[in-house]
Amino acid sequence: MSDAGDTGKVVSLSKRRKARAQDAERAKEMMAEVEDPSQVDPERLDQVVNEDLLKDKILAWLKENSEVELVPEGTLAPEEPENADDDADSVAVPADDSDAEAVEVEVVKD
């Protein structure tokens, strides 16, 4: 009888085979674009293919897990500081609803 560990190994092997198939397909596509395939370094080609596939996976993940909120034009304009007479830059950090104490941070330029 097989246990859950064996199932994980089968899934992992399946994913590796699929990844290798994607690598091979992408490498064929890239080699088709090259005038002289004998001038291509196979190790570098493998590296480029892996980077390209990783980039595709990252972009797909970002599309699935990101949220973009469109706002009216001009609403992202910087606000005027409350104390315009102050020579140093200061940043106010909004606090959450906890009992934290508000602290003003001042940047001093040398």
Image (cartoon, rainbow, N blue to C red):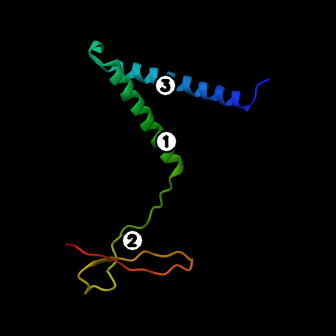
Element under label 3?
A: helix
* Mark closest to the chain's N terminus, 1 or 3: 3
Element under label 2?
A: loop
Gap in Å between the C-alphas at discs 1 and 3? 16 Å
Q: Residue at x 45, y 42 (%)?
A: 59
Residue under numbered circle 3: 22
Q: Quadrant of residue 14?
A: top right
Q: From the image, state whether disc 1 or disc 2 is nearer to you.
A: 1
Quadrant where the N terminus is found in the figure? top right
Residue under numbered circle 1: 60
Q: Locate residue 84, reporting x and y percent.
A: 27, 85
Gap in Å between the C-alphas at discs 1 and 2? 29 Å
Quadrant where the C terminus is found in the figure? bottom left
Q: Residue at x 44, y 35 (%)?
A: 54
Q: Residue at x 76, y 25 (%)?
A: 2
Residue under numbered circle 2: 75
